[in-house]
Image (cartoon, rainbow, N blue to C red):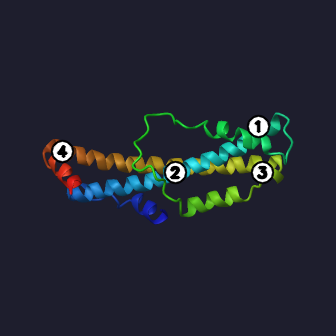
Amino acid sequence: MDVDLDRILGDDYLVGLAERSVAEVRSLRAECQAVETQLSYLRRLVQGRHDIVTGEMDRRLAGGEPGDVHELVERLPEILSDRIRAPGPGRLVASIEPPEPSGYLAEHLDSIAGALPLEDVTDEDLDATAGQLAALEGEVSGLRRALFTRIDTIEGELTRRYAAGEARVDDLLAHHAD
């Protein structure tokens, strides 16, 4: 994902967009959407881990003993269902099969989450980990927003072409019928 993400967010990715063929523009959109789907899934993984860490912090604040995570495990469905619906209109999911996260962002998540055994961790470590996860979620969300800007630009170009008669819906339908 890293190479694709860096290339897509690079300054020259959309250069000459208006001169590219409709097929090329559609391909750019599909590529951006695929990377956004990966980032979306990764963001949810980060959020889930953050929710578990803050759930453990809350459990301890309520008097739960460090090292006894049985109650935390019992509360996982409640903890993890907290962010099922994000604010805003959202976007349609292109695939129900989540891609396997890869690249430096996924490795960073693994390094944060892998260093924290909940049954033997201090309150300070929990707090630090929650901060790291929140920062990573912010980074991933920022990258998604940048991808959405790319996707919106590409979709705007396609819309302009349809409105100007440079592209036809029949061509799109024929392409999907093959």
| Label placed on residue 41 | 2
Q: Position of residue 8 (x, y in %)?
A: 40, 59
Q: Amino acid at mark 3?
A: Leu
Q: Amino acid at mark 4?
A: Tyr
Q: Is residue 57 left or right of residue 177?
A: right
| Front residue of 41 and 18 | 41
Residue receiving disc 3:
118
How far apart are the alpha carbons under marks 1 and 2?
25 Å
Q: Position of residue 105 (x, y in %)?
A: 57, 59
**Which marked residue is nearer to the observer: mark 2 or mark 4?**
2
**Which marked residue is nearer to the observer: mark 4 or mark 3?**
3
Q: Amino acid at mark 1?
A: Asp
Instruction: Tell me what residue is drawn at x 82 percent, y 46 percent.
Output: 123
Secondary structure under badge 4? helix
Q: Position of residue 135 (x, y in %)?
A: 62, 49
Residue 168 in view of the camera: no
| Label placed on residue 163 | none
How far apart are the alpha carbons under marks 3 and 1?
13 Å
How far apart are the alpha carbons under marks 3 and 2?
23 Å
Structural crowding at the residue carrying mark 3, measured as other residues with C-alpha within 10 Å and reported as few (<14), some (14–19) or many (≥20)? some
Residue receiving disc 1:
58
| Label placed on residue 162 | 4
Structural crowding at the residue carrying mark 2, measured as other residues with C-alpha within 10 Å and reported as few (<14), some (14–19) or many (≥20)? some
Secondary structure under badge 1? helix
